[in-house]
Amino acid sequence: MRTTITLEDDVAAKLRAEVRKRKNATFKETVNEVLRMGLLVRREVVAAPKFRVRARSLGTRPGVNYDNIGELLEQMEGPAHK
């Protein structure tokens, strides 16, 4: 099949470098081989299990006001928190 594609500069440069590595390969052969490898890898990728966040109570500290974040930071980290 013959088709026209537009390659971004970085992709074209990497393909040209790959052609130079493969001494007897043409640009066309290199593009086809790289596309085959990329498509194969995408098929073989297994989806990772979903990440779940499990909430848990961290408790509270007596004498700490959790309603004012500025005051809380001041109490926990001192005046240098800014």
Image (cartoon, rainbow, N blue to C red):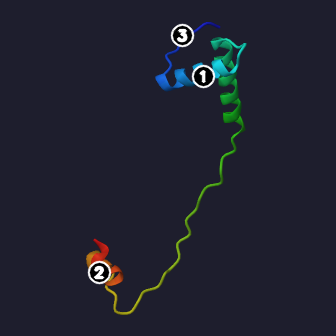
Q: 17 and 59: which one is in front? A: 17
Residue underneath mark 3: 4
What residue would you read off at disc 2?
A: 74
Residue on which disc 1 sits: 17
Q: Quadrant of residue 52?
A: bottom right
Q: Position of residue 29 (x, y in %)?
A: 69, 14
Residue at image point 69% right, 24% down: 36
Which badge, 1 or 3, is on the more N-terminal residue?
Answer: 3
Mark identifier at residue 31 = none
Tell me the kind of residue under disc 2: Glu
Counting from the top left corner in percent of width and height, residue 44 is at 72, 38
Helix, strand or loop at label 1? It is: helix
Q: Up-down: is 74 above or below 5? A: below
In front of the other: 2 or 31: 31
Name which residue type carries label 1. Ala
User: Mark 3: which amino acid?
Assistant: Thr
